[in-house]
Image (tube, rainbow, N blue to C red):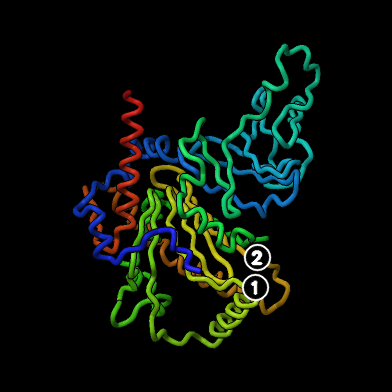
Amino acid sequence: MNVQSAIHMLPTEEAAKLRGRGPLSSKPYYDPEWYELERKAIFMRSWLHIGHVCEIPEPGSFILREVEFAKASLLIVRGKDGEVRAFHNVCTHRGTRLVEDAEGKRNQFSCPYHMWTYGTDGKLLSAPDFERFYVKKEDCSLKTVHCEVLGGFIFINFERHPRQTLRDFFGPIAEELEALPSARATHFTECRYEIAANWKTNFDNFQENYHLRFIHPRTSAAACWEENPFGYPVAYGFAGPHRSQTLPTNPNPPMPSAVMLDGYRRIGAIAVREGLVFDKADFKLFPAFHVVGLAPNQFTHTMWPLGPDRTRGQVRFYFTSDNDSASKLFAREMTTMTILDVLCEDRDAIISAQKGLASGAVSHVHFQDHEMLPRHLYETVQALVAEYQAEQEA
C-alpha cells in the first residue's frame, strides 16, 4: 500500500517549477503583529489535531485540552450515543471551569461553584432554583467547538461556521489517513516539549533534509550515501495547503549496532505478524501537523503556537496492540527512543535560528529547491493572511 498515492508526487526539478524562487521576508518568523494575524487567519480558522479516539474509548470518557492561543480550555467528550464532541470547559451560568482533571470518565459534568449540571451531550440537565432565571435550559447548553474525527485523529475548528468539512480540508489525503495504523490504534506513548522558536521555524526544520548531514551525523548515515550525500528526498507533492515527500533509501546502509539490529528485526517481525507492512508515509499537514507512518506503528508531531517566538510540540507514537511481551516492549522502546534522539538533536539549531531571525540582522531568508516544502508553507500562510485581511477590510 502506497500511503502517499493521494498526492501526485513529482521529481525535484519538476516540483520546484511549481514553487517560486528568490528570497522571502524574514519578518513573519518573529514579528508579533504578524503572529497575531496568523493566529486569527489560520489557527482560529483551520482544522487542528487535538487528540485521538483511543483516549476516550467509552461513553463518558473525556480529555481536557488547554489551547493557549485561543484562550480556551476544551472538554473533548464521547457521548452516550458514541459521538465525539468538543465543548468549552466553561459553565454557562457565570463562567466557572467545570473540570480540572486531564482525563477521566463521567456521566455528567457539574459546576463546582453553583452545581449547574450538564450531560455528555452538553445539554443543561439541572440547576438549583432554575425557574428564577427566566431562561430556557436549551439556551444554556455548553458552548461547542466544531469537532470531527478522521483516521482515529480528533480535530477541532474554532470558526463559528467552518468553510470546509474536515474531509474537504484534507481532500484526497483523507482516505490515506484512514489507512494508517493510527486509525485503529489502542494506545500511544507521548513526549511534549516547549521551544523558544516560532512555529514555522520549528516546523521548517522537519520539512527539509538540507541540515541532515550536519545536525544528525550519527543518525543520518542510513539516509546519506555517495550519490545522495544530503539524503535529499527524490520526489515532492502538494495537495492544497498540505505537502509530502518521498524519502530515498540507501542501497547499502551501514550495519547498525548489534542491539539496534536486534530491535529492528523484532519490530519487523511485529509488523508482519500484525499485518502492518506498508510504504512509509510522510505528510506535512497544514497548519502544523506532521504525520509519519512507520511499520508497525507510526508517530505524529503536532506543533502549537504559544507566541511569536515560542512553540509547544507534542510527539506521539501510536500502537495497535498491547506491549504483551518483553520482546515487543524492547523493540518499540528502541525505535521510539531512536526517533526522539533525532528530534533532540535539532533543538539547539532551531533555537539558534530563531535568535538570529529575531535580531533583525537578516531581512530575508533563502530557500533552495530542496527546501520547497518550507517555501510552500510560507506561501500558504501569506495567502491566507492576505485573504483574512481583505475580508476584514471589506
The numbered dot on residue 274 is: 1
Q: Is residue 351 visible?
A: no
Where is residue 394 drawn, in percent x and y?
A: 32, 23
Q: Which is nearer the eye, 60 or 306?
A: 60
Question: Dot 2 lies on which element?
Answer: loop
Q: Residue at x 31, y 73 (%)?
A: 230
Label 2 vs 1, first from the N-terminus: 1
Q: Residues within 10 Å of mark 1 (few under 14, many from 20)?
A: few
Where is residue 130 drawn, in percent x and y?
A: 77, 17
Q: Which is nearer the eye, 245 or 315?
A: 245
**Mark 2 vs 1: CB contact within 8 A:** yes
Quadrant of residue 385 within the rendered picture: top left
- Mark 2 and mark 1: span between their CA atoms? 9 Å
In the rendered image, the residue lying farthest to the left is 22
Q: Residue at x 72, y 29 (%)?
A: 123
Q: Residue at x 48, y 39 (%)?
A: 69
- When the figure is inspected, residue 302 is found, relative to residue 181, above or below; the finding is above
Where is residue 144 drawn, in percent x and y?
A: 61, 33
Where is residue 282 drawn, in percent x and y?
A: 44, 63
The numbered dot on residue 320 is: 2
Q: Residues within 10 Å of mark 2 (few under 14, many from 20)?
A: some
Quadrant of residue 91 within the rendered picture: top right
- Tell me the kind of residue under disc 1: Glu
- Tell me the kind of residue under disc 2: Thr
Quadrant of residue 88 within the rendered picture: top right
Left or right for 348, reference 57 = left
